[in-house]
Image (cartoon, helix red, strand yellow):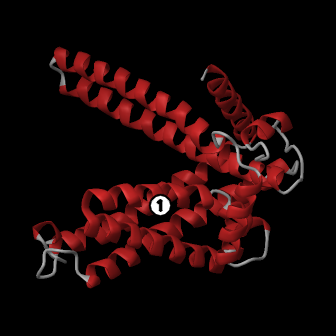
Amino acid sequence: MFERFKRSWGLVKASAGVLAKDKELLVFPFLSSIATLIVAIAFILPALGLGALDGFGKDGSGHVSPLWYLLGFVFYFVQYGVIFFFNSALVGAAMIRLDGGDPTVRDGLRIASSKIVPILGYAAIAATVGVILRAVQERAGVIGRIVSGFIGLAWTVASFLVVPVLVSRDVGPIEAVKESALLLKKTWGENLIGQGGVGLVFGLLFFLLIAVGVFAIIGAALTGSAVVIGIAVAALVIALMVVGLVQAALSGIYSAALYRYAKGEGASEGFDAQTLEHAFAVKK
């Protein structure tokens, strides 16, 4: 367990080293967060107006109607389209840095814009998967939630390298998903440190931040000052947002480096080849 955490922390430090050279990479998850929030508001407010919380979208048997699934698909499609676009911009810029270049925000956006068609195609595939999983959860109850959970996990693992594939190669979304799954099959790590390790480290950071923040808010409440309470709450929210942006940026950097390694391009700038080899050791 300690060795796994050590490797995870080493991975985070390596990714952070790359991020330290190009802090502008944080712009992409920041823009993604703003855009997805706008999309969510654009869908949620009309839904509330239609009485979604009062059973809108249910059919006579109490299940979600097909029309509601269609609306759900549109929502997933738009959200995923936004997320994948900025993820592609992040990974594209990270690829330039890993090749020894000095990327700019414009470079990342240019790369993502040039891949807009396959990005939207991948968004449609992911939206379809999302709707299917939601339908399984809704129709099959507890068992459905368990099954959809396993399927969702498998999809997350299989699609881990889709964005780097789309950015690096001139292929469609279906081919990108197939190649992502194939690369993972060939280079399967015991823990998939790229997801589990970074998630573990930042999960601990989020927990510590929330714990400290709660104590700070309680302390602020004891002062009886609304201003102090407001400052404590704002500080916690900002801290969580910053950590979330850093995690998203580091995950994008790692996926780019991991793709290069999986394709046999060797170590990337700022990454130790041995660290990547531990993450994705060839399956026996």
| Residue occupying the point 56% across, 41% down | 247
| Quarter of the image with the N terminus in it | top right
Is residue 64 or residue 243 the one in the foreground?
64
Three-letter residue code for mark 1: Ile
Q: Say left or right for 91 vs 215.
A: right
| Residue occupying the point 76% across, 36% down | 278
Residue projecting furthest to the front:
284
Q: Circle 1 is placed at which residue position?
A: 151
| Residue occupying the point 85% across, 45% down | 268
Query: Which quadrant of the structure image shows residue 51?
Result: bottom left
Residue projecting furthest to the bottom:
67
Can residue 246 be seen at all in this image of the molecule?
no
Check disc 1 and report its element: helix, strand or loop.
helix
Residue 282, given in percent of the width and then of the height, sits at 79, 46
Q: Say left or right for 3 vs 241.
A: right
Residue 283 sits above or below residue 144 on the image: above
Query: Which quadrant of the structure image shows residue 180?
Result: bottom right
Residue 260 sits above or below residue 41 on the image: above
Residue 234, given in percent of the width and then of the height, sits at 34, 34
Residue 69 sits above or below residue 239 on the image: below
